[in-house]
Image (cartoon, rainbow, N blue to C red):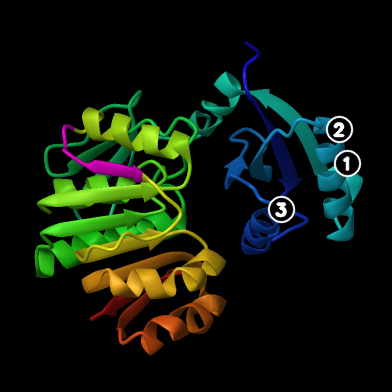
Amino acid sequence: MQAAKCLELRVSADFMHENVFAEFAEALGALGTALETDAASGISFHIAWFTAEEDEQQQRARLASATLLAGLPEKAVKLSSLAEQDWSTAWQKNWHGQPVGESLWVRPSFCPAAEADRIDIVLDPGMAFGTGSHPTTRLCLMAIERICRTWMPHTVLDMGAGSGILAIAALKLGANSALAIDMEEDAVAACKTNALINAVEMQTEMSRIPPGDTFDLVLANILASPLVEMAEGLSRCTGHTLVLSGLLTSQTDMVSHPYLDAGLRIERIDSEGDWAAITLQR
């Protein structure tokens, strides 16, 4: 059987801001995005990955047209095909262990373990997203750390879990149980793998909608549009605290509005660069 493929879109970071590229890629249906900087030259590229369609040539033409309509010069854009095994290791190129917050250390499985004073979170995302390197993931991890220092949630929901990093962090910080939900089969598989690597028990589920149960802590690091679409469901299953991220600082009012209408209140808003995380409470 022929290996599944993905299309990789690379855009020079000189021609498009990171937050603009994230929204651009989301609108085109990207599986995820990343920023890659060549260590030798210092040149940076925005990268987006797309599931290869049956008519790949037509898909390539559609993506190329979208970049032209966005005002990107042809020299700034590169489209290429990646076999599944190549795509699933693309994230490894520039990822190393890194401290997050006051007590966490996030690393790929091929890097050395954390020092004794930090909690080691080991990830093998495969074809799922969530390595701890993006500002929104760091913001969520620091929020989880802060919450667990203040009060310990017994039950945790990680909606749009990707690699499962947020649920794993909550469990390692002391939460009793966690449910990781994602709409992608590869993400659910990554969550199961990473739970085993980190020796934590974590429930997983493949779904597009929040569950009907209530959780002490709900985490959703997705993107602004699905956060607004899921507002009713996420608010309903929040028993105490909800952390939302994957949004820009300019989108905080738009995203938080339906949650406020659902009876939650904003506890704080944190930001890193252009990215933000909103912490709400029941």
Q: Position of residue 21 (x, y in %)?
A: 68, 57
- 14 left or right, relative to 30: right
> How would you rate the neighbour count of disc 3 (Cα within 10 Å): few for under 14, some for 14-19, many for 20 or more?
few
CA separation in Å, label 1 and label 3: 13 Å
Q: Residue at 17% across / 37% down in the picture? A: 115
- Amino acid type, callout 2: Gln
- CA separation, marks 2 and 3? 16 Å
> Which residue matches tag 1?
61
User: Can you see residue 143?
Assistant: no
Q: Label 3 amino acid?
A: Leu
**Magenta stretch containing residue 202, yes or no?**
yes
Quadrant showing the C terminus: bottom left
Q: Residue at x 28, y 61 (%)?
A: 142
Q: Dot 3 corresponds to which residue?
A: 28
Bounds of the magenta segment? 199-205
Toward which corner of the image does residue 258 lie, by quadrant?
A: bottom left
The residue that disc 2 covers is 57
Residue at 31% x, 41% y: name it: 106
Q: Can you say which quadrant of the picture contains the N terminus?
A: top right
Callout 1 secondary element: helix
Q: Crowding at label 2, few (<14), some or many (≥20) Cα neighbours within 10 Å?
A: few
Q: Are marks 2 and 1 in contact (CB under 8 Å)?
A: yes
The answer to whether residue 46 is above or below residue 225 is above
In the rendered image of this protein, does residue 266 appear above or below residue 59?
A: below
Q: Pointer 1 and pointer 3: residues touching (CB < 8 Å)?
A: no
Q: Identify which residue, 259 or 7, lies in the foreground.
A: 259
Apparent side of residue 140 relative to residue 82 in the rendered image (left or right): left
